[in-house]
Amino acid sequence: SFAESGHLVTHMRTHTGEKPYNCKICSKSFTTSGSLVTHMRTHTGEKPYNCKICSKSFTTSGNLVTHMRTHTGEKPYKCKICEKSFTMSSSLVTHIRTHTGEKPFNCKICSKSFAESGKLNVHMRTHTGEKPFKCKICGKSFSVSSRLVTHIRTHTGEKPYKCKICSKSFTESGNLATHMRTHTGEKPFKCKICSQTFMQSGHLSTHMRTHTGEKPFKCKICSQTFMQSGHLSTHMRTH
């Protein structure tokens, strides 16, 4: 039931699909005037909701509420399976899929499926070849924004990931994680055939060729093949 007739009218639009509020700039339509007002800010750039702690501003009050949790540490959305907590309900929904295995976002080209719509969007670029993230320094383009961020560090020399044991620094968190194994001795990548273990997945891949006999690196001059790219490089010097 609805306390006011106006609320009932708005609710009925969820059934009828009616969207009477139209954006005069891009022609998008909305069921409520409030949604149109919020949308208009994407055109005007207006961000009327300001954080009193760090001065960041937002287009909606809800986005400000979510942002405030980065300051307070509040994580009100809790997983009932593993008790992990999240600042946003959408993050919890995505996390739940790690337990259920649900992957509702399907690629229409190769039928791969994903737990997040964003990961599907990134995957689609492997089909389209789209690389929308361009380096302003050298013009190199990337399909994922995080790869551009990492690439920029090759220009700036920034290495924000620092080893707490030996003070070595790295441009990527993954490189730091790999490096840490030189201190811990951890070898998480195990061969299923002979049980030999390795620090890096790449080393395991190379090792697997000793079992399969695969030699993917081919000399373009004499057609000799090699298990490792380094062996091909050494061979090329004979030519």
Image (spheres, rainbow, N blue to C red):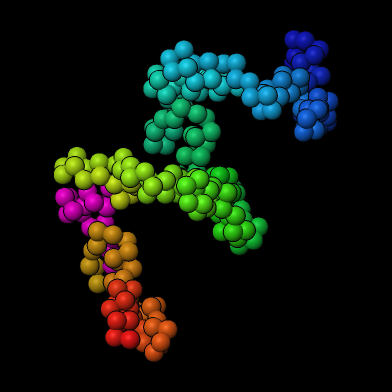
Name the residue located 46 percent from the left edge and 12 percent from the top edge.
52
Name the residue located 74 percent from the left edge and 23 percent from the top edge.
36
Residue 9 visible? The answer is: yes
Up/down of 39 relative to 173, above or below: above
How many numbered marks, from 0 up?
Answer: 0
Q: 179 left or right of 26?
A: left
Range shown magenta: 176-191
Residue 15 visible? The answer is: no
Query: Outermost residue toward the bottom?
Result: 222
Position of residue 171 measured from the top left corner of the image (x, y, whole percent): 33, 46
Position of residue 190 measured from the top left corner of the image (x, y, whole percent): 27, 63
Query: Quadrant of residue 197 in the image?
Result: bottom left
Q: 26 left or right of 164?
A: right
Query: Quadrant of residue 10 in the image?
Result: top right
Up/down of 89 relative to 224, above or below: above
The C terminus, quarter of image: bottom left
Name the residue located 33 percent from the left edge and 45 percent from the top edge.
157
